[in-house]
Image (cartoon, rainbow, N blue to C red):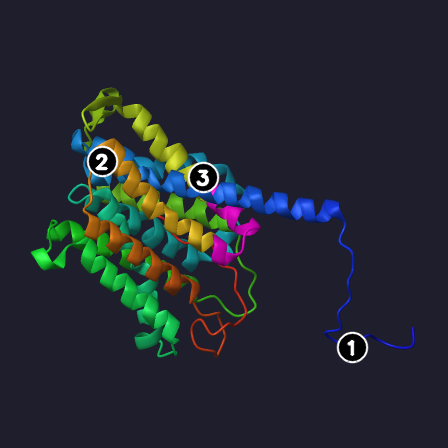
Amino acid sequence: MGGDAPVGACHHVPVPTSVTTRDSHAKGVGLGLALLSALAFGGSGVAAKPLIEAGLDPLHVVWLRVAGAALVMLPLAVRHRRLLRRRPVLLAGFGLFAVAGVQACYFAAISRIPVGVALLVEYLAPALVLGWVRFVQRRPVTRAAAVGVVLAVGGLACVVEVWSGLGFDALGLLLALGAACCQVGYFVLSDQGSDGEEAPDPLGVIAYGLLIGAAVLTVVARPWSMDWSVLTGSAEMDGTPVAAFLLLGWIVLVATVVAYITGVVSVRRLSPQVAGVVACLEAVIATVLAWILLGEHLSAPQIVGGAVVLTGAFIAQSSAPAKGSGKPVAGGGPERELSTPGRSA
């Protein structure tokens, strides 16, 4: 009563059991949603590849995915229509890079190389972001961040089997790398907002990104030339016929709409570090599903290399600098909330 308690003094304040129970429940729900999001994203390539092999052009599959998801997310776009005036550059960047660019490059890549390999190459994005920070922005990078980049590149060398002269289609690998570069473009663009500006609602950004991406892909993919009859037939998943419209429904509703929404909600319930670890499971899930459903087997060195890529990607991702922080990357500055980055799988 005679004055303020000293800063840092230990006060053992009892926490009601109901509060801790609610917190534990919220984290449990967040973890479950994050796992669901990783599963949904990871299954997109497995569902898309049979459609491509059945006769659809990769760009047409991308257009169907993005346009269908944009239609479902249209009510959210109407709700957040002020974003068009407040953050037009961010929305355009998300639509061009994180939606149209990433999806087009990724789906084109899986038409030429295994799904797991394409996604692991795309996981170079966090390492490439650090390269941008260090060599373009000339900001310091910590040793841990550099180790993450080295691990990601070294693991990728195992995945693509450099000792055998790149055992996969070179154009397919370049397309997967293009998907990674498109993600870098969005990460860099999302860092351009002014300090202190209120972060836009991620669901609104996703909704408008899908709409803009659909508009761009309509011009590029020219869906009016698509063989629509493929969607009325069936596609084969490792010899098993599956109705094409069911595969398309999975891609649109589950691998895009559900995946994005559950991913955004889970990030709000979990710490960025935990969410980042769970997000890395996307590549693992995609590889396992491709192995089971498509018969795409990876060798032991490729599996080990994939694990190294994910480890390096996680280190690099967790080392992203806080905006406005003068500290080195991963130096421990304040965290900044960003919109959910583009996901491909």
Residue 24 appears left or right of 129: right
Q: Check contact, mark 2 vs mark 1: CB within 8 A.
A: no
| Residue 49: assigned label | 2
Please report the residue visible at 53 percent of the width from the left and 70 percent of the height from the top.
Answer: 195
Residue nearest the observer in this picture, 53 or 207: 53
Quick one: SS at disc 3? helix
Residue at 20%, 46% (x, y): give it: 109
- Residue 342, given in percent of the width and then of the height, sits at 38, 51
The residue located at (25%, 53%) in the rendering is: 304
**Residue 148 vs residue 141, the one in the foreground:** 148
Mark 3 residue type: Leu
- In this rendering, the answer to whether 248 lies above or below 341 is above
Residue reaching furthest to the left: 165
The secondary structure type at the circle numbered 2 is helix
**Range drawn in magenta:** 261-274
Q: Which mark is residue 160?
A: none
